């Protein structure tokens, strides 16, 4: 009866003793210097004939390519050349409407409006954004106030099926005029 009370009071002590005894018996079985079966297996493997090494694959000759940048635009120069800026400055000296040529160009202003396509809209936090696919296949997200196209086109309205722009184009008399245009949903 007393033993059963002790067992109920401190079962972890007896469990620890039993676990230590089991662990020491397991370690005792690991001893010994008989590696004859391992030596026999190694000698068997060494006596087997060696396999043939497959030949190396044939090296394909790659044709060289010489890049000739003649006639291509230098990627390190601005899109508008200084002589074009001077021409724009001369046009903008008159009164009235004129583009802001000191403003930093946005990415979609590098493409003509004819190659840009509206492919959808997305609403983010109750703001409607337009999705524009450029000629290079990249899809851009635009909102009211962004610029696109070569004629300083500023986005004035975005609806589910159309993006309306106000462009500033050069007039025949050397002045500027506003022209409204739009991109409609194509895909």
Image (spheres, rainbow, N blue to C red):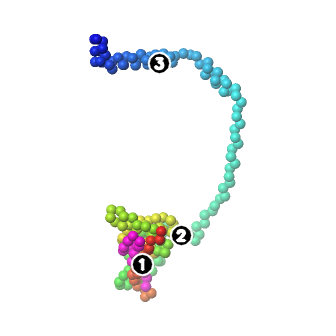
Q: Is residue 146 above or below residue 93?
A: above
| x, y percent for residue 92 | 39, 81
| x, y percent for residue 120 | 43, 67
Residue 158 magenta-drawn? yes
Q: Which residue is pictured at 40% across the width and 83% down the height?
A: 176
Sequence-wise first label, 2 or 3: 3
User: Dots 3 and 1: beta carbons under 8 Å?
Assistant: no
Magenta region, residue range = 154-171
Q: Is residue 47 above or below residue 166?
A: above
Disc on res. 26? 3
Sequence-wise first label, 3 or 1: 3
- Residue picked out by circle 1: 181
Mark 1–mark 2 Cα distance, whole angstroms, equals 29 Å
Q: Is residue 78 visible?
A: no
| x, y percent for residue 85 | 44, 76
Q: Which residue is pictured at 46% across the width and 65% down the height?
A: 139
Q: Is residue 65 visible?
A: yes
User: Dots 2 and 3: beta carbons under 8 Å?
Assistant: no
Residue depth check, mark 2 versus mark 3: number of the one nearer the observer: 3
Quick check: 7 left or right of 88? left
Mark 2 Cα shell of 10 Å, populated few (<14), some (14-19), many (≥20) = few
Mark 1 Cα shell of 10 Å, populated few (<14), some (14-19), many (≥20) = some
Q: Which residue is pictured at 39% across the width and 83% down the height?
A: 177
Say what secondary structure mark 2 lies in. Answer: loop
Q: Which residue is pictured at 42% across the width and 78% down the height?
A: 181
Tell which of 122 and 42 is nearer to you: 122
- Residue picked out by circle 2: 73
């Amino acid at each position: 009866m007393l033993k059963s009370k002790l067992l109920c009071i401190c079962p972890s002590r007896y469990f620890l003793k039993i676990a230590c005894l089991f662990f020491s018996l397991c370690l005792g079985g690991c001893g010994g210097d008989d590696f004859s079966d391992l030596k026999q297996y190694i000698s068997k493997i060494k006596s087997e004939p060696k396999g043939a090494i497959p030949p190396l694959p044939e090296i394909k000759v790659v044709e060289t390519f010489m890049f000739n940048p003649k006639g291509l635009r230098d990627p390190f120069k601005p899109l508008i050349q200084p002589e074009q800026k001077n021409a724009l400055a001369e046009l903008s000296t008159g009164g009235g409407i004129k583009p802001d040529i000191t403003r930093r160009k946005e990415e979609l202003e590098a493409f003509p409006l004819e190659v840009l396509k509206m492919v959808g809209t997305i609403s983010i936090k109750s703001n409607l954004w337009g999705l524009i696919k450029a000629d290079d296949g990249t899809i851009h997200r635009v909102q009211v106030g962004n610029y696109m196209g070569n004629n300083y086109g500023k986005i004035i309205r975005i609806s589910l099926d159309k993006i309306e722009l106000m462009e500033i184009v050069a007039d025949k008399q050397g002045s500027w005029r506003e022209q409204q245009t739009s991109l409609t949903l194509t895909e």
